[in-house]
Image (spheres, coloured by chain):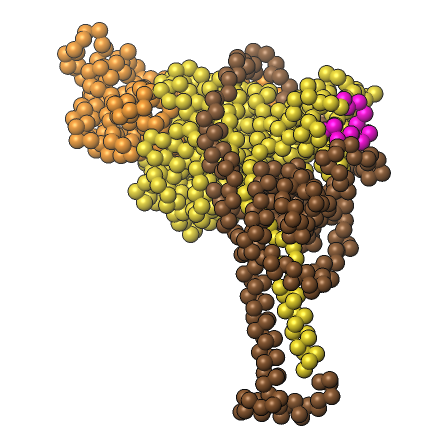
Chain colours: A orange, B yellow, C brown
């Protein structure tokens, strides 16, 4: 009991510091992108001139970053394959870019189940991109389960938006 | 022969007699109602005495099994706890139990707390205990007094000298900040353990309440971490290549069951904390997650959608003998083994409605015990009598922690500072 | 007397009876034996059935204000949520020293229980007229101590004519009295629910009532005493039942049937039905 108490105090005081330290120890920080000028391919005429070709915004706005899934399903829908095909082509055009696929679920499912389901969805997107020629090493996945909804009402209109896979540029992009 | 006949006659008379001479009555119905109990402010140090009695009253009241009576109605003023109370005057105000206590400052600065529990009808002392503590520690003593009273009256161990680790939530649903937090069972002494710059989920206590396992997004891959309360150290658990989540300690605290996702598939693993060796328990292509050990450590309940929908399964702790046990309506997940071993609490999902239920460990006797439509993630009080769980409010309005008796009675909110979810109940603090 | 019969004659008679049902001696014996055995059968049957007659398990004297567990659940469910815990700001560890977790230096080891008061020496005369029988109070420790000197079974000491007098009572009227008593006790009984094995919560009392319906004496049956001595759940269940019995006295029962209800044994409290709801 005494141990608990004294250590507790210490734990609370030092929690933030310790956590910060842990971060650096446990994971390589992926914030050092390669030189941005390395985009060799001539970019297609951008829709809006202010968007830099090969940038995260380029992917999100001009290519499309989000695909959707049916309830409890994780197979890539036929209607989304064209979009993922464009993502794959874009990634081949900018070979320095690395991406993370976020997998999300709607609120119908336990926290744990949805984390697993989000992982399935993210992985399904990754596999599709890889099947289109993207190197597997450039694509990470992460599941947020139901923890990051983009819409919060409890109806199918909202749920269908939340069941999604989102391709996020994690490094190597032009900026 | 005649003797024999006489004997027969006597036997016949005896056989019939007891039932006839004495009325037999079976009382099978009652009215569940809290026990009226009088807990006057403890005498001695007036401030500490009032504080401690107040915490005891609040603890017992929240259990739903006691109804502390209003002090204003007390006819007798307790001045000396070493005198036998006037039971008649306590009966007159309907008290069935009476607690008298005294708080005194010791020469060395410590507090001495004595209390006695009286059976008002039986006119006898049921319990008398004495504690010493430092003055700032009075709340724990109050909880220990509550536990002793609860145990003496109900026959069950108490659960008041315990803590809750939970996830504190702030901000809008689309960018919710989730922090690891800990507080006393009654909501007192809340403390953050993480700073909110990254998301954390599903914390669980180890059996000594010295360590917390939880899932954290602090690094690029979400993983299970251990937070050692004794040293303040935090470390990622194991060297897994991918996302790990839904940790839970074994009853001896030496192992952690968790879920590892590989290539989109989630399976249950067990890691030995001493040798750091890892054993894979499920290999099914379905989602296998949310493992929970039985109190004897021999079995693990988990949830799987291998049969087409999420259901509760049980396996031996080495992964053998996997079998589905939930066959009720809807999906059933997050099984949590009762500390007594007799029940599994779980989350039932029917459409978008989530409810907490309990069932026997073979899946029979399913009962739903919570009334919200967004209740999930049950955790047991160490005595197996009360559960807490998260209750979502819907529409992005955050969530709350609620508790309910295993019978389904006494459902009430656990006060937390702001939104909160994912409660995990500690064992009794040692 | 039959003791004069020698064994050979008895055997002969028996043998004879088998082949010749109607002889001068045979019929008397045969009738006697027959009557005796029929009596036994009837007695046995009565004994068996009388349980049902006297305490119909499913007798529906369910009081109107019976509250089932389900109802309670619903009531609880409808209760408005607790008020917001207005702004209990959790102090940030980084900003200020966190509040002490309040765990220092507890000496949890409660010292051995203080010496018990000898309540009996100081019990004053009863003030409340409603409870004239102070002896009725139950000291559970005293009850448990009686284990060493178990009560003598009362049954065998009863004169046989009590049984005959009781025959008239083993009917619907008796059942009504049992139900009347039940319907008065139930509202004071908060059934225990805690034990993992519900059988541990079933307790039997021997209750004697005074003619005015107050408790004359209350004793745990030897079986329950034994169980309560070793099982905290049973002890708690016994105490809960005892509180119910005292709290709801005096019992209003038909005075002219006092011979039926002066002694109830066993008065059983069985929460299992309620637990299953």
Question: What's the residue at 50%, 25% (across, down)?
Answer: B413
Q: Is residue C268 visible?
A: yes
Percent x, y of residue B61: 60, 27
Judge left or right: residue C143 versus residue B366. right
Question: What's the residue at 75%, 58% (across, down)?
Answer: C152
Toward which corner of the image does residue C232 lie, by quadrant?
top right
Taking the magenta stretch, the answer to whether it contains residue C57 is no
Percent x, y of residue C35: 59, 76
Q: Nearer the viewer, residue C92 or B150?
A: B150
Percent x, y of residue C10: 65, 89
Q: Residue furthest front?
A: C256
Could you tell me what secondary structure mostly forms the magenta stretch? loop
Question: What's the residue at 72%, 16% (across, down)?
Answer: B47
Question: What's the residue at 22%, 9% (across, down)?
Answer: A51
Q: Nearer the viewer, residue A1 or B414?
A: B414
Q: How many marks?
A: 0
Q: Residue furthest top?
A: A50
Judge left or right: residue A158 versus residue A14. left
Taking the magenta stretch, the answer to whether it contains residue B88 is yes
Q: Is residue A23 visible?
A: no
The segment highlighted magenta reads B77-90
Q: Nearer the viewer, residue B145 or A164?
A: B145
Q: Is residue C210 above or below residue C10?
A: above
Q: Is residue B136 above or below residue A69?
A: above
Judge left or right: residue A158 versus residue C194. left
């Amino acid at each position: 009991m005494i141990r608990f108490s004294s250590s507790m105090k210490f734990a609370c005081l030092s929690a933030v510091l310790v956590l910060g330290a842990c971060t650096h120890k446990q994971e390589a920080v992926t914030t050092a992108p390669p030189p941005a000028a390395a985009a060799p391919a001539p970019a297609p005429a951008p829709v809006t001139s202010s968007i830099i070709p090969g940038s995260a915004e380029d992917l999100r706005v001009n290519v499309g970053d989000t695909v959707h899934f049916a309830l409890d399903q994780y197979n890539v829908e036929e209607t989304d394959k064209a979009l993922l095909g464009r993502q794959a082509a874009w990634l081949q055009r900018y070979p320095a870019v690395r991406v993370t696929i976020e997998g999300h679920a709607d609120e119908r499912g336990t926290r744990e189940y949805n984390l697993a389901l989000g992982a399935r969805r993210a992985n399904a997107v990754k596999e599709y991109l890889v099947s289109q020629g993207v190197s597997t090493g450039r694509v990470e996945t992460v599941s947020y389960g139901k923890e990051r909804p983009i819409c919060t009402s409890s109806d199918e209109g909202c749920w269908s938006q939340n069941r999604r896979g989102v391709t996020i540029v994690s490094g190597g992009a032009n900026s | 022969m005649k003797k024999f006949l006489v004997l027969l006659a006597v036997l016949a008379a005896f056989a019939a007699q007891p039932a006839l001479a004495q009325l037999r009555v079976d009382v099978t119905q009652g009215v569940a109602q809290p026990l009226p109990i009088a807990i006057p402010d403890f005498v001695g140090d007036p401030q500490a005495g009032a504080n401690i009695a107040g915490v005891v009253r609040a603890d017992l009241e929240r259990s739903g099994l006691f109804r502390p009576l209003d002090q204003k109605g007390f006819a007798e003023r307790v001045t000396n706890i070493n005198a036998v109370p006037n039971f008649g005057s306590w009966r007159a105000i309907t008290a069935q139990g009476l607690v008298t206590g005294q708080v005194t400052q010791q020469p060395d600065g410590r507090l001495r707390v004595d209390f006695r529990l009286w059976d008002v009808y039986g006119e006898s002392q049921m319990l008398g205990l004495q504690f010493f503590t430092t003055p700032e520690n009075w709340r724990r003593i109050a909880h220990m007094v509550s536990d002793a009273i609860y145990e003496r009256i109900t026959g069950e161990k108490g659960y008041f000298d315990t803590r809750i680790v939970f996830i504190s939530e702030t901000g809008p649903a689309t960018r919710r900040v989730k922090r690891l937090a800990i507080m006393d069972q009654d909501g007192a002494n809340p403390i953050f353990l993480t700073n909110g710059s990254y998301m954390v989920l599903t914390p669980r206590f180890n059996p000594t309440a010295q360590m917390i396992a939880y899932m954290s997004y602090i690094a690029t891959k979400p993983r299970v971490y251990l937070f050692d309360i004794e040293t303040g150290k935090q470390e990622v658990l194991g060297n897994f290549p991918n996302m790990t989540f839904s940790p839970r300690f074994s009853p001896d605290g030496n192992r952690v069951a968790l879920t590892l996702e590989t290539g989109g598939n989630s399976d249950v693993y067990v890691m030995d904390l001493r040798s750091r060796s890892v054993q894979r328990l499920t290999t099914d292509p379905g989602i296998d997650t949310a493992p929970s050990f039985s109190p004897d450590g021999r079995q693990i309940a988990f949830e799987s959608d291998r049969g087409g929908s999420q259901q509760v399964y049980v396996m031996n702790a080495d992964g053998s003998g996997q079998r589905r046990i939930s066959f009720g309506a809807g999906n059933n997940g997050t099984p949590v083994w009762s500390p007594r071993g007799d029940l599994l609490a779980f989350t039932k999902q029917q459409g978008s409605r989530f409810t907490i239920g309990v069932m026997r460990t073979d899946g029979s006797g399913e009962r739903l015990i919570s009334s919200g439509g967004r209740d999930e993630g049950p955790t047991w009080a160490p005595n197996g009598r009360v559960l807490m769980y998260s209750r979502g409010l819907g529409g992005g309005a955050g969530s709350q922690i609620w508790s309910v008796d295993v019978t389904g009675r006494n459902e009430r909110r656990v006060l937390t500072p702001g939104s909160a979810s994912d409660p995990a109940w500690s064992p009794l603090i040692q | 007397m039959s003791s004069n019969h020698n064994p050979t004659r008895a055997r002969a008679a028996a043998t004879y009876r088998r082949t010749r049902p109607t002889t001068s001696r045979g019929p008397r014996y045969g009738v006697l034996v027959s009557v005796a055995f029929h009596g036994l059968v009837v007695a046995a049957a009565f004994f068996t059935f009388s349980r049902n007659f006297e305490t119909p398990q499913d007798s529906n004297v369910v009081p109107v204000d019976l509250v089932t567990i389900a109802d309670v659940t619903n009531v609880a469910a409808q209760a408005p949520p607790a008020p917001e815990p207005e702004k209990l700001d959790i102090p940030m560890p980084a900003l200020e020293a966190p509040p002490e977790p309040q765990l220092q230096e507890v000496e949890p080891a409660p010292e051995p229980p203080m010496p018990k008061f000898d309540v009996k020496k100081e019990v004053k005369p009863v003030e409340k007229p409603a409870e004239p029988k102070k002896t009725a109070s139950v000291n559970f420790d005293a009850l448990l101590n009686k284990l060493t000197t178990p009560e003598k079974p009362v049954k065998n000491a009863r004169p046989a004519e009590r049984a005959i007098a009781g025959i008239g009572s083993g009917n619907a009227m008796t059942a009504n009295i049992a139900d009347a008593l039940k319907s008065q006790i139930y509202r004071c009984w908060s059934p225990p629910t805690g034990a993992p094995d519900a059988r541990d919560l079933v307790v039997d009392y021997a209750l004697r009532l005074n003619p005015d319906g107050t408790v004359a004496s209350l004793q745990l049956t030897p079986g329950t005493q034994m169980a309560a001595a070793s099982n905290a759940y049973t002890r708690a269940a016994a105490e809960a039942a005892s509180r119910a019995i005292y709290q709801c006295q005096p019992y209003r029962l038909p005075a002219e049937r006092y011979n039926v209800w002066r002694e109830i044994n066993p008065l059983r409290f069985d929460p299992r039905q309620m637990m299953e709801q």
